[in-house]
Image: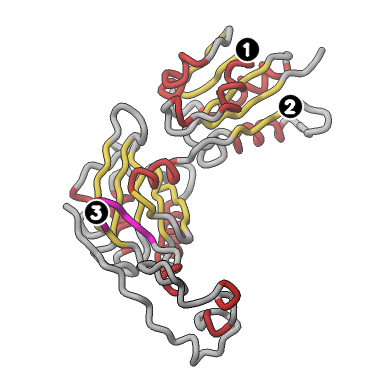
Amino acid sequence: MELGKIYVVGFGPGSEEHITTRAIYALQQSDYIIGYKTYVDLIEHLVTAQSIVSTGMTEEVSRAQEAVKQAEAGHTVSVISSGDSGVYGMAGLVYEVLIEKGWTEEKGIGVEIVPGISAINSCASLLGAPIMHDACTISLSDHLTPWQIIEKRIEAAGMADFVIALYNPKSGRRTRQIVEAQRILLKYRSPDTPVGLVKSAYRDSQHVVLTNLAEMLEHEIGMLTTVIIGNSSTFFYDNKIITPRGYQRKYTLGEEKQSLKPHQRLKKEAEPWALEQDKESAKITEPKSKKKRIH
């Protein structure tokens, strides 16, 4: 019997214009669509599958097992995730179930991971440009990961001045985690650090709030919210959150003529902060950004 195939499809935030062409192709080629009921409802109009299997929030393992079972029976299956299937999605779990069965790529069923726009990207686009510099994602859900480990990750990210996207920040039963995250980050960040709260990006119930680290808990935060917290250089401007990449150090952003020629910009003297420079020359003054509070 010929083996089938599993597509693990990330369909982005949910709006049709943000689903990739490859994702739509995979959905339309599939005999089975398997996913969390809320996500199935978002893409059901795009599929022609003979069978749609939708299950509850905590049934991830059974969805992966069903997908493998149907693919082994010769069917083409799409397992769906919102955002990107490889970012807190179903991709890793599908591989884990296959590995338990001794799967190999050479002899086993075909598997294709179809990427999608993750929440850190879709939410950032609605806020302006908050993740222009080094950033990380941290899930505050401790259903599968011990809180002590999550706490260490928040501490490390705060200490290293990452822009941070918090996934799964709060639910009806999990309310302390976001409070603890704020407490930890206030040790390393100014209370005025810009924060964006984006609920249901690019869906009908989309809601965007601009606030700061000190006041973010005064606003509604739930499981559908992604919390993006700026770094030490992030600033507000005209209802946007901007994290500069560092161009202002080498370029004259308000003038057409640049003070440094292209061949000069990568010379050591133009980068006194770089690893190659001695400690004395590395002592530079960072340019001050014009910050604007938005209520």
Q: Which residue is drawn at 22% across and 61% down?
A: 292
Q: Mark 1 belongs to which amino acid?
A: Asp
Residues at badges 2 and 1 in contact (C-beta under 8 Å)?
Answer: no
Magenta highlight range: 237-243
| Residue beneath disc 3 | 238
Q: Is mark 2 on a helix, strand or loop?
A: strand
- Per the image, label 3 sits on a secondary structure element best described as loop
Please say whether residue 90 is one of the residues in the magenta stretch. no
267 displayed left or right of 260 = right
**Most foreground residue, 88 or 237:** 237
Q: Mark 1 points at which residue?
A: 31
Mark 2 or mark 3: whose residue is earlier in sequence: 2
Q: What residue type is labelled 2?
A: Gly
Reply yes or no: does residue 241 show up in magenta.
yes
Using the numbered discs, state the Cα–Cα distance from disc 2 to disc 3 in whole angstroms. 49 Å
Residue pointed to by mark 2: 110
Residue lying farthest front?
257
Question: Looking at the image, is mark 3 or mark 1 earlier in the sequence?
Answer: 1
